[in-house]
Amino acid sequence: MALQRPKGTQDHLPDGSPKLRLDVSARAFRHVTDTAAQVLERAGAAFIETPMFEEAELVKRGVGGSTDIVRKEMFMVYYFGDHGGYVLRPEGTAGLVRAYLENGLKQLPAPFKLWTHGPMFRAERQQRGRLRQFHQVDYEVLGSADPLVDAEAIWLMVQVVQALGLKGVQVKLGSIGDPEDRETYNAYLRELFGAHTERLSDDSRDRLERNPMRILDSKSPEDQALIAELSVKPMLDFLGAEAEAHFTAVRSYLDAWKVAYEVDPSIVRGLDYYRRTAWELHHAHIGAKSALGGGGRYDGLAKELGGSDTPGIGWAFGVERILIAMEEEGLSLPAAPQPQLYVAALDAEHVPLAAQVALGLRAAGLWADFGYKPQKPGNAFREGERRGASQVALIGSDEAAAGTVALKNMASGEQSSVPVSELAGLLGRQDAPDHGALSSRS
Ligand code: AMP
């Protein structure tokens, strides 16, 4: 049997592939990242890229030792050097904050906005929308604790998904308070769940010691049943005065900008370094348990990574889940750009000339394809049409002798004889190919 790709990974396929779906379309991935670039860079975010593997210690400190990601889902990188402790990055924030600190970006004016996109790795059980290699778009702002930065981050996340045409998205907003507030809350949870340890899942018994808040995040049905039965008070009831004021400020900005959101007291976020503002982006078709994306403030992270105290906030969404949501909403991609010209030779002798004409046009900045074998005019027109070319040029002995091509405009059917030296000018004057607008199939 032929070798196959690893479980939990996907190939991103070109247009025309027999197995093409929106969530495995290479062009769809690029459309999402191009759209994110447009929205985020207009807001002053700078693009950054960091390595796909990092020291395990960075991920452990950044993501939190008590999280499932660190405890169960890390991909070790076996490395024959003097240091073996590397893992494939499971998320982007820890690496970005490390890069910010390590490269002196702190000297630049704050708040400093960064964005990136790329593959992330978690050894999860594969399901639709849950992969071992998935892709995120990631936005982070370092150097400000201002609630205005939080509100702008949420606004930008919503702008990106709206620019992609998604309608059924919902922001669920919460606050997980300051560390002292969380301590009080954890003490409350320890006491509450401590009386029912026998009903907790093994993982949650462990969480009871390490980080009881994470029990609320548990996917286990037995934990969820117990949570419902105990009517656990939400973290929001435990906010201190400062965290409360911050939360109110974020909400008032969002209200003023008419960003729809719902306060969700159950938002806990899986990662240890989050503080205050936390939110998730949901979609009706993705299911309540899996978000399109999430974000939050992480003022404690830079210090945790050994840097100086630097407040930060950021969000990430999963590109695959965005594409699944787009597919569910019946959204399609903008039309693919198409060649301006297809050049065909009428006999074998003139194939090199056809190629040369196409290459010359490409060098002049046009998109020209050519045929590798001679074709009769009817076949050449059909081939040009199949490729979506706006014009087809034929070269036979007469054209070669005269230094011309026989040009057919595929839209009007008009045919003319055009000197090769005038082709670039003629094609260049015509409207650039229509990339089309995002349209709904419904
Ligand atoms: P997280 O870093 O866990 O908050 O995840 C942020 C977003 O990344 C999620 O909302 C998903 O859209 C996406 N994501 C996380 N894990 C996976 C996965 N295993 N497969 C696909 N997408 C994922």
Image (spheres, helix red, strand yellow):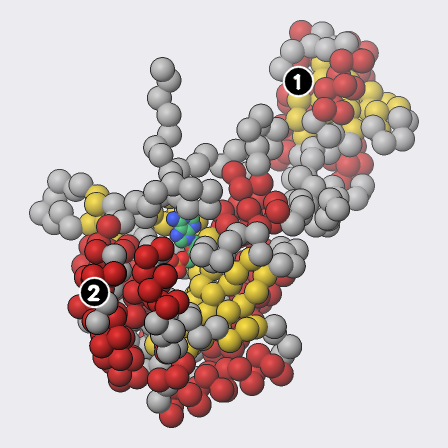
- Residue 355 horizontal side relative to residue 406, left or right: left
Comparing 222 with 272, the one in front is 222
> Hey, what amino acid is under mark 2?
Thr
- Residue 24 horizontal side relative to residue 210, left or right: right
Which numbered tag is attached to residue 371? 1
Q: Earlier in the sequence, mark 1 or mark 2?
A: 2
Question: x and y percent of residue 384 in the render?
Answer: 74, 23
Residue 310, visible in the rendered structure: no
Query: How many neighbours does mark 2 have within 10 angstroms: few (below 14), some (14-19), or many (20 or more)?
Result: some
Question: x and y percent of residue 80 in the render?
Answer: 13, 40
Question: x and y percent of residue 369 in the render?
Answer: 66, 26
Identify the residue at horizontal 38%, vertical 41% (top origin): 126
Identify the residue at horizontal 30%, vertical 70% (top origin): 213
Q: Quadrant of the N terminus?
A: top left
> In the rendered image of this protein, does residue 429 appear above or below residue 92?
above
Residue 363, visible in the rendered structure: yes
Query: How many neighbours does mark 1 have within 10 angstroms: few (below 14), some (14-19), or many (20 or more)?
Result: some
Distance from the alpha carbon under mark 1 to that under mark 2: 72 Å
- Which of labels 1 and 2 is toward the front? 2
> Hey, what amino acid is under mark 1?
Gly
Q: Which residue is mark 2?
A: 197
From this viewpoint, which residue is outermost toward the left? Answer: 82
Does dot 1 land on a helix, a strand or a loop?
A: loop
Which numbered tag is attached to residue 245? none
- Residue 206 horizontal side relative to residue 313, left or right: left
Residue 353 quadrant: top right
